[in-house]
Image: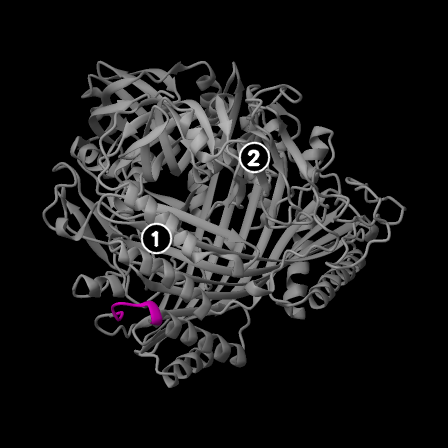
Amino acid sequence: MKELIDRALDHASAQRATYADIRIVRQETQFVLVKNGTVEQVSLGDEIGFGVRALVDGAWGFASSHRLSASEVDAVTDQAVRLAKASARVHQRPVRLGEPVRSRGTYKTPLAIDPFQVPLEEKISLLLAADEAMRRRPQISVASGNLVCIRDHKTFGNTEGAYTEQELVQTGAGISATATGEGEVQRRSYPNSGGRNQVCEGYEFVLRQDLPGNAQRVAEEAAMLLTAKQCPTGATTIILDGSQIALQVHESCGHPIELDRVFGAEAAFAGTSFLTTDKLGSFMYGSDMVNMTADATLPGALGTFGWDDEGVPAQRINVVRHGRFVGYLTDRESAAKLELPGSMGAARASGWNRIPLVRMTNVSLEPGTWTLDALMADTNDGIYMETNRSWSIDDRRLNFQFGTELAYEIKSGKRGAPLKNATYTGITPAFWRSCDAVCNADHWIAWGTPNCGKGQPSQTMHTGHGAAPARFRNVRVGVAS
Amino acid sequence: MIGEAALKTAAERVLQLARDHAKRGEGHGNPHQPDQQQAEVVLIGNDSSLTRFANNEIHQHVAERDVTVHVRVAIGKQVGSASGNGLDDDTLRSVVERAGVVARLQRQNPDFPGLPGPFLIPSPGQADPTATSTTDEGKRPDSKEAPPRVSRSTANSGGAPGTTASAQSTLDATPEARVTRAGIVCRRAQEAGFVAAGACSTSALETVVANSLGTLGYHAGTHARLLAVVGGATSSGYSVRQGADFASLDAEAVAEEATSKAEGGRDPDDIEPGEYDVVLEPYAAEDLIRFIAALGLQGRALLEKTSFAAEQLGQRVLSEHVTLHDDPLDPTGLVQPFDYEGVPKRSLTLVNQGVVQAVTYDSLTAAKAGMQTTGHALLGAGSSGPVATNLRLQPGRFSRDELIRKIERGLLVTRFWYTRSVHPLSVTVTGMTRDSTFLIERGEITRPVKNLRFTQSYVKALQQVLGVGAEPLLVGDSYGSPIRTPALAIQGFTFTGKSEY
């Protein structure tokens, strides 16, 4: 690997690249899908490739290939240089990268149980056991479970002297039950929506979820929702469970703090941001209860690594402190543009064939002081919502609407009747300013969002979000169609 | 491009490796007989480039070369899958062995009907002596008959025999040529006091599907797209042009459409949410068609009872103005002659004047439903279902201005953004308007208005169609396949929230 890396960097430098880097990535995957008692899919993936970035005449070029050979490295580097030179023809300001990055070292995701060493039969049996438990409810038309393991071997080098090797492991698992009847379709998922929760841990994570142990409850809740009351329409107090808070944070904070987005780099696709640079340090994003961080060192979380895809070390920063907006996610180029001391290490590429973009690492709502029971008891009238079902937000990250799988009335501090088709909507800063309570660390979980989309060509990134339940006042619910 | 011969050779090598692996398995005391085993290989060669711009300059410029190998091995009803990338023997062997190991460890899937076929797809330009044959989908693997030869010309909506989906201009497109087109958009935007963002992309995709029953098909296609968002402080506009042919991408037209929409959308007024009649430009109409097909008109949704079309086949569920096809052989679109199981594709009418006529199946869902595959197998996890990938809404007879004149008071919507399903049965979707929305009063556009959020059942919307435009456009960008659709006028579209911009 080192020889190919050095070759690419030397080749780029010889062609007047003022900066170049190369990533070689091998990704192994394992995926098991069980549905209605059958093992629908078991697949093993193993792909490898490399990508070279070159900065020439102040502009970027990037080329990639699956063929690892000296001649291909030369050809791909030539291509990256050519693309950079072509870019420079329609370019207004030379790219600056700030201080050099010379990180060296190795990093491996800490694991108790290597998920790739766990026999497939054991994984299949686990999911089938959960599946069987869910299908005991006659209303369940679809019971499904899935399990994924991913291992990325990443080697990175740049012309400034950085050289890092990482072995990053992810494990994810989940179940869901879809009930049909009474002219309705309702689904319950565990431990998270979107099929599963996913983290940077080993198989110990899967065992902790106890999928078979939760299967019966999941099915019962799905069936119950068929005849539950419709979520009412109006403005009320809501308490969101931690998994829904995680997605709320992802959409309404994680994305608008991507500094490349703020500078317009995503205007053609994912959009821009309402958190313009004049707001840094002064804008009240939320209430005094709201503290948010971006932390790529968070143990076990999905956005944790040793170095980002520009070789910048993983780090933790404050994003919102007592409601005040104080920090962006950055890469080297965007940090230099804002004249920050350096990148905070959020340059991430989804694979060897994609450039690094500013992506979330682990963007979290820090825990508060409440227990969930106390928070419920303290809420006279409202709705408790759990597990995301739908999500939508505008291209500046202001107007949003979310739906959850399950909700309950809160009446006089007690959990009441279940509600179906719960939705809530709002405008981001008004919503976070209405937050008046956050649950404590006992309720705080590092949730994973393995399906974050950005970029052209598109990239799917895996991001983490720590969150505990929280309460919001005067929120519009029950959006009628 | 890698080339037909090289890819077919690799596919045949994979099948040979699979046969060898099966024999070795039997030799090690494995209870399965080699003739119980089936194997399938899908090879995809991808050579693509993208020139991306923002703030009137090129800020990202990327290129990619890859070839992926996807193998399924079935031992009776035990199916294993594996994938890799590369055509070298070590990679092919590794993929085959992993798929075989998984198949041996697997549980039986009683729903697995066996691999479909065999089918032989003529190479582009190859004459087909059996041009009168019809497809013989869903043949059982133990059939002793000679594999039927399927002519694209008999199985399509009018494409010429040997029609190629590859345009030389796309294969030859250079970084400099893409930069030139991007530059045209940036200059036009800058002259108007706006900033342009967008992407100019070119790609060549080669696909081979082969299986142990004798299916073998090769297809090469190109795709070129120029997309632009032009905007300023208070407005933005959008445009996209795409097809197989890079030379036909009209950068001036894209620049003009996006810029003039941004100009017209300057300083929008507030508007209250509520129910409005709407004219949806093709970019917005696309979203309704995509969701209706993906959530309702595919076999998995029917089987899982989440589709609005369940027990409604043959009945009028949508407006009589709605006729929707899946047209994979349309030479003006992005041609796909076969699916990822090698089943030949043909034009399929999903909705005919509002009557739900058909849904899409792959071999697995077809077998479960007691139907024939319609050639809509996707690659990899089938959890999203066998969705249509070449949707075409039949044009009507109204110009855009005539559709607008139908509206007493309503909205002209350029496109929808971040749309997500709220409820699958009614295909209730929420999302935002984007890139300029305009008030229509007494049949005329009067002023721009700020963005709105909608929450709307798309089934209901397509039941309330006032008119269908005459001029279709191939639309769609990053997610899903392009769709060809004209504009739509719809009565009573529900907007549930408003934006401050």
For the magenta stretch, what is the residue range? A89-95
Q: Amino acid at mark 1?
A: Gly
Query: What percent of the width, then of the height, locates residue B246?
Result: 52, 60
Q: Which mark is residue A445?
A: none
Which quadrant: the C terminus of chain B? top left
Which residue is labeled 1 in the image?
A: A303
- Could one spot residue B265 in this view of the protein? yes
In this picture, residue B82 sits left or right of residue A426: right
Query: What percent of the width, then of the height, locates residue B468?
Result: 51, 30
Judging from the image, what secondary structure is the residue with disc 1 in? loop
Q: Is residue B268 above or below residue B68?
A: above
Q: Is residue B356 above or below residue B238?
A: above
Establish whether labels 1 and 2 are both on one chain.
no
Q: Residue furthest left?
A: A282
Characterize the local packing of mark 2: few (<14), some (14-19) or many (20 or more) Cα atoms within 10 angstroms. many
Judging from the image, what secondary structure is the residue with disc 2 in? loop
Asked whether B488 or B50 is in front, the reply is: B488
In this picture, residue B64 sits left or right of residue B136: left
Front label number (1 vs 2): 2
Q: Which mark is residue B395?
A: 2
Numbered label tally: 2
The residue marked by circle 2 belongs to what chain?
B
Q: Is residue A158 above or below residue A348?
A: below
Tell me how the rendering is colored: one colour
Residue placed at 45% from the left, 45% from the top?
A172
Query: What percent of the width, then of the height, locates residue A325?
Result: 15, 47
Query: Marks 1 and 2: CB-CB under 8 Å?
Result: no
Asked whether A348 or B388 is in front, the reply is: B388
Q: Amino acid at mark 2?
A: Pro
